[in-house]
């Protein structure tokens, strides 16, 4: 018996975990998919404090100190595991309250990227926060894991903001390229946005094929019984999309992500990151 692909939500010890859970529960219900809440513990970070405190002291004193540090590390590890279990149990109850029948929870030591890449064959949709635990103290507006995760994974990722409510209007940022064409086809074929009006927006500099590409997107979605509004608005893509999201009360944005190499993004910046910062709504990212 084949196990259906799941919605996998990555949560941590921050208040953003509530919004990630809310979004993942909504997606799991929409797609009638299993939901898993995953919490990763970083063993290297956990034990970093006790790596080398021996110094130039006597053998017996050094041994006693190392034993004491080992005991502290083990106590810290046990405490973190227990906090993780409490977090997952709380979020599991939250997901059940949102209508998910039997959400699964998993906690493990490991690297987040390695864990998600290894799991993606069983995943239909990843859900993670644009900000995470580190942002509680740094106030970073875009979490350090977002670009790394999106570049590493081939499945869609729903990146959640500091709040989540079930979407009533969806916007596809469409450029006519292969990635966003797949996005249109995915929306047409998936139950995720079924019953919601879908806006398709092209921006930037008009090209000869722009209207033809926009007509294709409109007809593809209309044939799948979606109510569609399609438009081309010239101008800076980041500004146009941000203004459109606000003016049309868009609740969720779908767009292609990180089409250029990390090296190019280092020198020229990343449109994906710029859009994530400016849009302020949950965003479904495609690779």
Image (tube, rainbow, N blue to C red):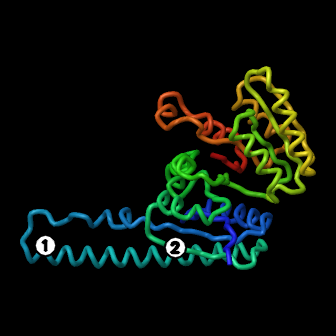
The residue at 55%/49% (across/down) is 143
Q: Position of residue 37 (x, y in %)?
A: 61, 70
Real-space Cα distance between discs 2 and 1?
34 Å
The residue at 54%/55% (across/down) is 136
Please tell me whether residue 149 is drawn above or below residue 12 in the rendered image: above
Q: Nearer the viewer, residue 214 or 22?
A: 214
Quarter holding the N terminus is bottom right
Tag of residue 62: 1
The residue at 73%/25% (across/down) is 204
Tell me the crowding category of disc 2: few under 14, some 14 to 19, or many 20 or more residues within 10 angstroms, Cα based.
Answer: some
Image quadrant in which you'd find residue 5: bottom right
Q: Position of residue 240 (x, y in %)?
A: 76, 30
Judged from the image, the secondary structure of the residue bearing numbered disc 2 is strand
Judged from the image, the secondary structure of the residue bearing numbered disc 1 is helix
Tag of residue 257: none
Tell me the crowding category of disc 1: few under 14, some 14 to 19, or many 20 or more residues within 10 angstroms, Cα based.
Answer: some
Q: Which residue is mark 2?
A: 107
Q: Nearer the viewer, residue 8 or 136?
A: 8
- Label 2 vs 1, first from the N-terminus: 1
């Amino acid at each position: 018996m084949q196990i259906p692909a799941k919605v996998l939500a990555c949560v941590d010890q921050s208040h953003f975990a509530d919004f990630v859970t809310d979004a993942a529960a909504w997606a799991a219900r929409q797609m009638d998919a299993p939901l898993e809440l995953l919490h990763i513990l970083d063993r290297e970070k956990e034990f970093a404090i006790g790596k080398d405190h021996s110094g130039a002291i006597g053998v017996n004193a050094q041994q006693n100190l190392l034993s004491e540090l080992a005991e502290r590390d083990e106590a810290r590890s046990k405490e973190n595991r227990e906090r993780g279990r409490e977090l997952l149990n709380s979020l599991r109850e939250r997901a059940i309250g949102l209508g998910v029948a039997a959400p699964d929870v998993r906690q493990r030591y490991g690297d987040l990227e390695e864990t998600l890449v290894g799991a993606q064959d069983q995943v239909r949709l990843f859900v993670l926060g644009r900000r995470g635990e580190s942002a509680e103290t740094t106030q970073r507006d875009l979490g350090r894991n977002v670009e790394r995760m999106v570049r590493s994974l081939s499945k869609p990722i729903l990146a959640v903001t500091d709040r989540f409510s079930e979407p009533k209007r969806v916007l596809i940022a469409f450029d006519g390229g292969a990635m966003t064409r797949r996005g249109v086809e995915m929306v047409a074929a998936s139950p995720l946005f079924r019953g919601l009006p879908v806006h398709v927006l092209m921006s930037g500099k008009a090209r000869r094929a722009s209207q033809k590409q926009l007509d294709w997107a409109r007809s593809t979605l209309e044939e799948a019984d979606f109510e569609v509004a399609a438009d081309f608005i010239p101008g800076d893509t980041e500004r146009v999309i941000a203004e459109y999201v606000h003016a049309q009360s868009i609740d969720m944005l779908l767009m292609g992500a990180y089409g250029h190499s990390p090296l190019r993004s280092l020198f020229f910046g990343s449109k994906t990151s710029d859009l994530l910062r400016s849009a302020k709504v949950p965003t479904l990212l495609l690779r």
